[in-house]
Structures are given as C-alpha cells and as structure tokens.
Amino acid sequence: MNYDPQLYPPPPSTAYPSSGPYVAPPPAGYPMKDAPNPQNPPPVETKSRGEGFWKGCCAALCCCCVLDACF
C-alpha cells in the first residue's frame, strides 16, 4: 500500500494554539484583586449570646449524660 501525503497530511503539532493553560473564570461575586470593590458592606455587628444559648448547651449536655446512663 502506498502512502500519499496529499491525501493524509501529517497532523498538526498542536490541536489548539498554545497560549498557556486554560484558566476558568472565577465564580460570580468572587472578589477580584485587580477590580475595584463597588459594594462596601456595613460592618457586621455581633450580638452577645444570651441566656437561651447556655440553657440549650446545658440541656444538650444533660441529655447526653442521661442517654449514656440509660444505654
């Protein structure tokens, strides 16, 4: 069988132009270091944990102790 270079040219060295690795764009809303930040959110105010938080912690601890004693 004869090989005809006109019918079957050699494949190109690269299928795509090599301009470096493909980098996916960041997700929407992701802060960019070069872009200005148009939204300046107000500082978040933290609230102290009230009595309900500690009551819940004590109830959970007591529940775990009771379950441990029963089983």
Image: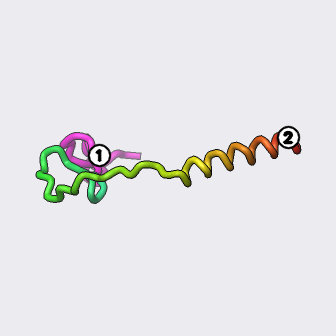
In the picture, the disc for residue 11 is: 1
Extreme residue toward the right, this view: 71
Query: Which residue is rendered at x = 49% and y = 52% of the image?
Result: 50
The disc labelled 2 sits on which kind of residue? Ala
Asked whether 24 or 49 is in front, the reply is 49
Locate residue 45 relative to residue 65 in the image: left or right: left
The disc labelled 1 sits on which kind of residue? Pro
Would you call the spot at circle 1 few (<14 residues within 10 Å), some (14-19), or many (20 or more)? Answer: few
Asked whether 26 or 64 is in front, the reply is 64
Residue at the disc numbered 2: 69
Q: Secondary structure at mark 1?
A: loop
State yes or no: residue 30 in magenta: no
Residue 70 in percent (x, y) is at 88, 44
Indicate which disc, 1 or 2, sits on the residue closer to the N terminus: 1
Locate residue 63 relative to residue 11 in the image: left or right: right
Query: Which residue is rendered at x = 28% and y = 44% of the image?
Result: 10
Q: Which residues are magenta?
A: 1-24
State yes or no: residue 3 in magenta: yes
Asked whether 36 or 60 is in front, the reply is 60
Residue 56 in percent (x, y) is at 61, 51
Q: Nearer the viewer, mark 1 or mark 2?
A: 2
Residue 36 in percent (x, y) is at 11, 52
- Magenta: main secondary structure: loop
Query: Which residue is rendered at x = 17% and y = 44% of the image?
Result: 33
In the picture, the disc for residue 50 is: none
Query: Which residue is rendered at x = 27% and y = 46% of the image?
Result: 22
Q: How is the image coloured?
A: rainbow
Extreme residue toward the front, this view: 51
Q: How many marks?
A: 2
State which quadrant residue 39 falls in.
bottom left
Quadrant into which the C terminus falls? top right
Report the Cα–Cα distance between label 1 and label 2: 75 Å
